[in-house]
Image: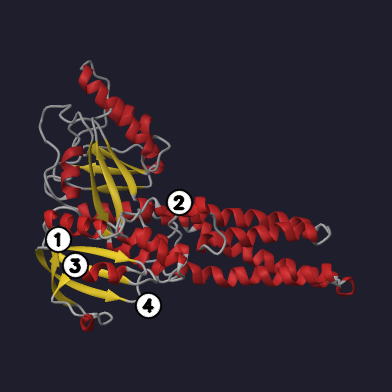
């Protein structure tokens, strides 16, 4: 059993009890609840009796009989008022009656073990719970619906069909495959490897969708970095002042950029300084810079570039960068060097003070972060690094097996690699798995899910 809602005060708290004895364990603690009220999926009200056999709350009870419940077992959900004291009393009472606390992700683990979902769908449950944008939730919901598993099914069947032909050749020498037949089988493996390659490449976008991107705002002091940061996150998070070096500690906020979670980093301006505190801030800025997926290089459009601007450019040269020409509300005195214009992904003129063209900057930034594939993509997107590793392992075995097969080696040699390729795909859905893999997956779940 476990509390399935967040800890703390709220309107309602929900507790789950799963297992063959779930109903028999809960029923004695309910007053005014007859056996006739235990109708599948029909909620009823009852007084819950605490450890002293006294009513502690009026609760709503719902019974989901197995195997049609979420876990595939008998499942009882108890909704009480959202006081932590009440949730704890109900929990302690049921533990005393013989229940035990669930491990992280144990409800979903039982659903997987009882055939209610495959392993990829189980991981999508966690991703759905942890979604921070609507697009993240959309991708997770598609995975939960089995989209990745459905995409892998035909590819796996294609490899298995080739395996069957080759194993038949081993068993029955008189059925040896002709050179033309070997070529056709090789083409099928090549096609399967290509399809897996497409899924691996989708991880470029999938990683950004799942983990988000980090964007570092670079520029000399008073170029308007903090004003732009405040405008992008839509509230005054950073202190804006005329005095250079105001920002010492890094400020990090996450925004929803067209469905992509983006961490914006506003840190100390990168410059030489004699102030020991500011120098520490600059060192930290350089660390964030190296970890970022994109840089917004903010320059003051109302004055010419100076050596400090060029010094920052030398620091960020070679990194994906969008040039932001700030203070467009003032007369333009900046001439952008051709080299700087050429090496940046794009350039945008804005006024953080007047809030002009900030939306254009967001659109450019989104396009720069996702150049190969756009958000809203209709194909399957791999968002899980474990899935990507399994796909890459399967591709590697297919390539090695194909090399041996085309080289005319006996079928048992490529067969070994092709079987390994199928096993790697099975680890994504859980058809072939180990206890270590299950521990790795479900240890990242919250308790109660």
Q: Earlier in the sequence, mark 3 or mark 4?
A: 3
Residue 51 at x, y = what percent? 16, 58
User: Which element carries disc 2, helix, strand or loop?
Assistant: helix
Is 213 on the left or on the right of 36, as rendered?
right
Label 4 vs label 2: CA separation? Answer: 25 Å
Q: Residues within 10 Å of mark 2 (few under 14, many from 20)?
A: few
Residue at left 53%, top 52%? 389
Label annotation for residue 439: 2
The CA span between labels 2 and 1 is 34 Å
Residue 344 at least partly seen: yes
Question: Farthest front residue?
Answer: 53
Q: Mark 3 sits on what residue?
A: 29
State the residue position of label 4.
68
Q: Quadrant of residue 434?
A: bottom right
According to the picture, the residue beneath numbered tag 1 turns out to be 50
Q: Residues within 10 Å of mark 3 (few under 14, many from 20)?
A: many
Front label number (3 vs 4) = 3
């Amino acid at each position: 059993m476990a509390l399935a809602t967040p800890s703390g005060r709220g309107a309602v708290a929900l507790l789950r009890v799963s297992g063959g004895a779930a109903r028999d364990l809960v029923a004695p603690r309910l007053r005014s609840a007859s056996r006739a009220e235990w109708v599948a999926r029909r909620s009823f009200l009852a007084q819950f009796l605490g450890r002293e056999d006294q009513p502690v709350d009026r609760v709503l009870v719902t019974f989901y009989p197995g195997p049609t419940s979420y876990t595939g077992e008998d499942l009882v959900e108890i909704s009480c008022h959202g006081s932590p004291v009440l949730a704890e009393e109900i929990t302690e009472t049921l533990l005393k009656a013989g229940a035990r606390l669930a491990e992280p992700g144990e409800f979903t683990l039982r659903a997987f073990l009882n055939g209610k979902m495959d392993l990829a769908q189980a991981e999508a449950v966690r991703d759905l719970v942890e979604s921070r944008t609507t697009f993240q939730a959309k991708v997770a919901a598609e995975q939960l619906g089995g989209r990745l598993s459905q995409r892998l099914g035909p590819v796996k069947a294609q490899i298995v069909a080739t395996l069957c032909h080759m194993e038949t050749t081993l068993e029955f020498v008189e059925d040896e495959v002709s050179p033309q037949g070997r070529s056709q089988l090789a083409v099928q493996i090549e096609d399967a490897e290509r399809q897996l390659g497409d899924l691996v490449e989708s991880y470029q976008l999938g990683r950004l969708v799942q983990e988000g991107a980090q964007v570092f705002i670079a520029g000399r002091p008073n170029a308007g970095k903090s004003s732009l940061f405040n405008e992008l996150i839509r509230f005054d998070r950073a202190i804006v002042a005329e005095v250079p070096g105001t920002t010492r500690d890094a400020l990090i906020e996450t925004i929803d950029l067209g469905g992509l979670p983006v961490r914006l980093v506003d840190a100390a301006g990168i410059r030489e300084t004699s102030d020991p505190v500011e120098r520490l801030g600059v060192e930290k800025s350089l660390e964030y810079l190296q970890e970022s997926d994109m840089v917004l290089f903010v320059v003051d459009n109302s004055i010419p570039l100076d050596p400090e601007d060029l010094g920052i450019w030398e620091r960020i040269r070679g990194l994906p960068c969008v040039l932001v020409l700030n203070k467009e509300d003032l007369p333009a005195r900046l001439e952008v060097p051709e080299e700087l214009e050429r090496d940046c992904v794009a350039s945008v003129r804005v006024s953080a003070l007047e809030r002009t063209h900030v939306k254009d900057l967001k659109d450019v930034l989104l396009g720069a972060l996702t150049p190969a594939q756009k958000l809203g993509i209709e194909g399957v997107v791999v968002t899980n690094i474990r899935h990507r590793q399994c796909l890459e392992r399967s591709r590697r075995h297919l390539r090695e097996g194909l090399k041996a097969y085309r080289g005319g080696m006996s079928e048992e040699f490529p067969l070994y690699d092709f079987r390994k390729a199928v096993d790697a795909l099975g680890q994504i859905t859980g058809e072939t798995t180990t206890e270590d893999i299950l521990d790795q997956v479900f240890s990242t779940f919250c308790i109660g899910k």
